[in-house]
């Protein structure tokens, strides 16, 4: 190992609205919720990631939980810096404090210059000497295993926590795209609203997410075995007393219909803007679905019905962006065209 390689430490970072992943030497070393808990009296960070999520919506007035990212970009610069620093401290040993850190960080395609600067400044605050950024849909395509350098059209739909990115990629670039602020968090909000209106039950974000994972579906005629009814615990808005309600997957299909319809509209809009030669490629190859939202039962089938195109689910939807970011980090020279400094 050369001295330069020994003194430099490369990290691929997926700063997600819901989860932050960090890869080092080809291994995912951090995969935790994007949240921190602070003491409001001293401004001291009490917990980062999974530990902070356990506190979320269960704190008293002297402890505050903060999600630094909103819609895929940094909304709270100081909290984001503390979160990145806390997560890196979990994996960076004492010997890594010498030398320089090189980061490749993925960002949404719709990120503004101000938001890019916030990402770069956060990385530099935790010791990064070189900072590169890559658009999430490009990273997702690399993670899926697509050859983005070819003169062929590939359509990727990345449904994350804060944004849904719909892009057509060819020759290492994004030809046409649609970015929607409708994704996992919007699904959770719709579930909270539905439970309040339909069942007079007040639930929190964490309960909504668990319900989405347990029985989340977007069509009623599933090809797979339907999930069992799920018990939801919350506070009765009429009496103020805690109560339980059983929810079927068919109810979730109704709840999520509006949000998924907007994603379908975004896909159709992007297809309309796609050049005809690339549209022919997409007809042959189909649409690639990735991101945490891709796990919704029946989503691929529903999109296929609307577009009349084959829809493929990525092998590991949650890790596609992280894998692609890692690929670009290991081959900086090969993917210089898709990296931003």
Image (spheres, rainbow, N blue to C red):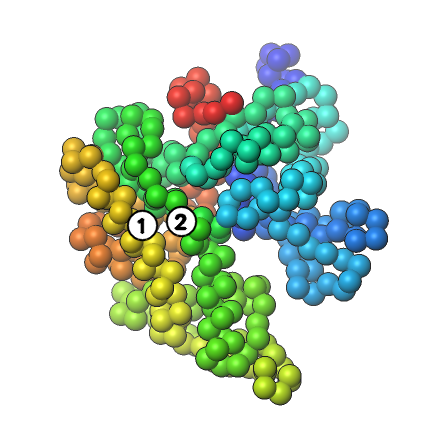
The reply, left or right, for residue 211 in relation to residue 81 is left
Measured as percent of width and height from the top left, residue 106 is found at 49, 35
Residue that badge 1 annotates: 266
Q: Secondary structure at mark 1?
A: helix
| Quadrant location, the N terminus | top right
Q: Earlier in the sequence, mark 2 or mark 1?
A: 2
Q: Return the residue nearer the eye: 96 or 155.
A: 155
Q: Return the residue nearer the eye: 2 or 187.
A: 187
Q: Answer yes or no: do the residues labelled 2 and 1 have beta carbons within 8 Å?
A: yes
- Image height check: is 33 above or below 176? below
Measured as percent of width and height from the top left, residue 57 is found at 66, 64
Residue name at image x 39 percent, y 45 percent: 179
Measured as percent of width and height from the top left, residue 139 is found at 42, 35
Residue 145 falls in image quadrant: top left
Measured as percent of width and height from the top left, residue 261 is found at 32, 60
The reply, left or right, for residue 7 in relation to residue 303 is right
Residue name at image x 20 percent, y 35 percent: 275
Residue 305 falls in image quadrant: bottom left
The reply, left or right, for residue 285 in relation to residue 26 is left
Q: Return the residue nearer the eye: 307 or 29.
A: 307
User: What crowding class fits label 1: few (fewer than 14 Cα within 10 Å), some (14-19), or many (20 or more)?
Assistant: many
Residue name at image x 33 percent, y 32 percent: 174
- Image height check: is 204 above or below 26? below
Residue that badge 2 annotates: 180
Residue name at image x 24 percent, y 34 percent: 153
User: What crowding class fits label 2: few (fewer than 14 Cα within 10 Å), some (14-19), or many (20 or more)?
Assistant: some
Residue 66 visible (yes or no):
yes
Label ID, residue 28: none
């Amino acid at each position: 190992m050369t001295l330069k390689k020994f003194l430099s430490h490369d990290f691929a970072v997926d700063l997600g609205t819901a989860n932050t992943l960090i890869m080092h030497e080809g291994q995912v070393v951090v995969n935790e919720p994007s949240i921190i808990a602070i003491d409001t009296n001293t401004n001291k960070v009490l917990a980062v990631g999974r530990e902070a999520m356990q506190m979320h919506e269960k704190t008293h007035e002297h402890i505050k939980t903060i999600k630094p990212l909103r819609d895929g970009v940094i909304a709270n610069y100081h909290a984001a810096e503390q979160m990145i620093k806390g997560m890196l401290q979990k994996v960076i040993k004492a010997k890594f404090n010498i030398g320089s850190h090189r980061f490749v960080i993925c960002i949404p395609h719709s990120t503004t210059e101000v938001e890019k600067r916030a990402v770069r400044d956060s990385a530099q605050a935790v010791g990064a000497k070189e900072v590169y950024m890559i658009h999430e849909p490009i990273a997702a395509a690399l993670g899926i295993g697509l050859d983005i350098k070819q003169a062929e059209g590939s359509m990727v739909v990345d449904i994350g926590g804060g944004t849904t990115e719909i892009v057509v990629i060819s020759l290492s670039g994004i030809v046409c795209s649609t970015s929607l602020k409708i994704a996992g968090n919007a699904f959770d909000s719709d579930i909270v609203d539905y439970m309040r209106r339909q069942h007079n039950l007040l639930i929190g974000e964490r309960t909504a997410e668990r319900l989405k994972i347990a029985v989340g579906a977007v069509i009623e005629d599933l090809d797979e075995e339907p999930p069992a009814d799920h018990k939801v615990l919350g506070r009765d808005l009429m009496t103020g007393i805690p109560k339980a309600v059983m929810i079927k997957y068919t109810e979730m299909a109704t709840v999520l219909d509006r949000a998924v319809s907007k994603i379908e509209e975004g896909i159709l809009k992007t297809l309309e803007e796609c050049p005809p030669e690339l549209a022919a490629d997409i007809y042959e190859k189909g649409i690639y679905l990735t991101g945490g939202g891709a796990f919704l039962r029946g989503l691929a089938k529903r999109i296929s019905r609307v577009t009349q195109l084959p829809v493929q689910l990525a092998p590991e939807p949650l890790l596609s962006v992280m894998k692609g970011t890692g690929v670009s980090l290991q081959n900086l020279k090969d993917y210089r065209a898709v990296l931003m400094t």
